[in-house]
Every structure is written in C-alpha cells, then in structure tokens.
C-alpha cells in the first residue's frame, strides 16, 4: 500500500514539472538563444533599439559593449545585453 501512495503523490508532480518545462522553460531558452545570435550579428552602422527604448546607430563593436550614436555629437556605451532588437541592419 505504501508504494501505491508514493506513486499517487509523485506522478502528478512529475507531470506538472513536465508541463511547466515545455510551456515556460523551453520557450524562454529558445528566445534567449535567438537574442544571443542577434547580438553576435550586430555590426557597425546597424540601427538598434535598446531595452530602455533609445534608438541609435552602432558606431563601434567591442567585446562586451557597443558604442552607440544617439545624435550628431552624442555617443554612449552600452552593454551588449541591453540591445532589445535590431531596427535596420546595414546588410538590408
């Protein structure tokens, strides 16, 4: 009887974990991988949008950061992870 009770309580938790994995964890990992690939493809003169909503043009690509031009005489350095998406690539 004790073994039957164990399966009665453990199986639903395993099922819930499986559902949680495929509905939450797996899609998040896929989005993260796509974002990392996008960051690797960013080059000089690409137009990007930061996570804070700043529209800018990439002036220089460093190992962990980008130098962005936000106006004629205004530049700023941001972490690569702060780029939300590429608005316009120079290859297009």
Image: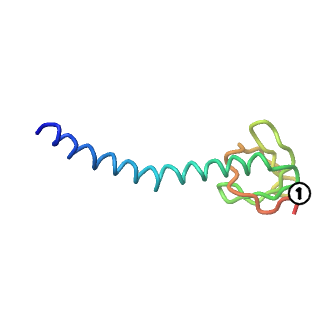
Which type of secondary structure does the marked residue at label 1 adopt? loop
Q: How many marks?
A: 1
Residue at x-position 33% and y-position 46%: 14
Front residue of 68/23: it is 23
Q: Is residue 27 left or right of residue 36?
A: left
Question: Residue 29, relative to residue 6: is it above or below?
Answer: below
Looking at the rendering, which quadrant does residue 52 occupy? bottom right
x and y percentages locating residue 10 in the rendered image: 26, 43
Residue at x-position 83% and y-position 51%: 58
x and y percentages locating residue 25 in the rendered image: 49, 49
Q: Is residue 15 left or right of residue 78?
A: left
Question: Residue 46, relative to residue 76: is it above or below?
Answer: below
Which residue ends up furthest to the left in the rendered image? 1
x and y percentages locating residue 12 in the rendered image: 28, 50
Front residue of 43/34: it is 34
x and y percentages locating residue 51 in the rendered image: 65, 55
Q: Is residue 81 left or right of residue 47?
A: left
Q: Tell me the quarter of the image containing the N terminus.
A: top left
Question: Residue 60, relative to residue 49: is it above or below?
Answer: above
Looking at the rendering, which quadrant does residue 66 occupy? top right
Q: Tell me the quarter of the image containing the C terminus.
A: bottom right
Residue at x-position 81% and y-position 59%: 47
Q: Is residue 13 left or right of residue 6?
A: right
Residue at x-position 41% and y-position 52%: 20
Q: Residues within 10 Å of mark 1 (few under 14, many from 20)?
A: few
The chosen color scheme is: rainbow
Find disc 1 in the rendering and name its residue. Answer: 72
């Amino acid at each position: 009887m004790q073994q039957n009770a164990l399966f009665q309580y453990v199986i639903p938790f395993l099922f819930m974990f499986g559902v949680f994995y495929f509905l939450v964890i797996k899609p998040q990992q896929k989005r993260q991988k796509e974002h990392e690939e996008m960051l690797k493809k960013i080059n000089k003169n690409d137009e990007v949008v930061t996570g804070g909503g700043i529209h800018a043009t990439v002036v220089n690509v460093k190992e962990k950061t980008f130098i962005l031009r936000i106006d004629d005489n205004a530049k700023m350095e941001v972490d690569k992870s702060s780029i939300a998406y590429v608005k316009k690539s120079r290859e297009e």
